[in-house]
Image (cartoon, rainbow, N blue to C red):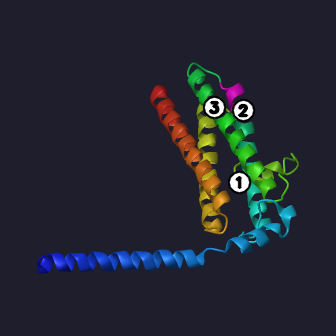
Amino acid sequence: MNADENDTKANNNTENNTSIKTNAGNLKALTATKMLRERARQHVEEGAVTTGYAADKEAVIGLLNDALATELVCVLRYKRHYFMAKGIYSESVKGEFLQHAKEEMAHADRIAKRITELGGEPNFSPDGLSSRSHAEYRPGDSLVSMIKEDLIAERIAIESYREFITYLGNDDPTTQRMIKEILAMEEEHADDMSSLLDGMRIKTD
């Protein structure tokens, strides 16, 4: 074995030793099984919220209820637009409105479920719904204005969800993952509405 091979072997051994030490350090950070079992038995009535939950639970529930209101308002607005859309270009647009209404309702259901998992109550009350929602309920008086209002609402939802994700950080990874998935759908919705709006402008020019 020459000098270069000896150096390579030495470097590999060093890397392996470092990896072993790192893994050993990570293992030390894990909670012992006995302690995990004891923690799980404490405050068992809180369900999914264990002592390891780092976020402000009440604040997160409040933000989730705001998000729930936003989704419900979007459902109502898309439904109205679906039924009120008229004109020679309306059929394909109506299909998008209806699909988005269904997807926004699915978002609302996911958010409501997460609220209950955190020990809260989802607020479905119509009283104050529009004031709790980040997005506005604007009916629009033409096909173009309907699409535009839906695009604006999606942009509002996108910004609010991005801020929510930042707020959560690593304190509530389950809620953060859900909001990230909903955000991705809202970005698709915004892209759909933007494309429809561009298409309508071309057709009416």
Numbered disc 3: secondary structure: helix
Numbered disc 1: secondary structure: loop
Q: Nearer the viewer, residue 191 or 86?
A: 191
Q: Is residue 57 rendered magenta in the image?
A: no
Q: For mark 2, what is the residue?
A: 79
Which of pointers 2 and 1 lies earlier in the amino acid sequence? Answer: 2
- Outermost residue on the left side: it is 2
Q: Residues within 10 Å of mark 3 (few under 14, many from 20)?
A: some
CB atoms at circles 2 and 3 under 8 Å apart? Answer: no
| Residue 48, image quadrant | bottom right
Q: For mark 3, what is the residue?
A: 99
- Outermost residue on the top side: it is 88
Numbered disc 2: secondary structure: helix
Mark 1–mark 3 Cα distance, whole angstroms, equals 21 Å
Mark 2–mark 1 Cα distance, whole angstroms, equals 18 Å
Q: For mark 1, what is the residue?
A: 134
Q: Residue at 64% of width from left, 67% of height from top?
A: 167
- Residue 107 in the image, given as x and y percentages of width and height: 69, 44
Q: Nearer the viewer, residue 140 or 150?
A: 150
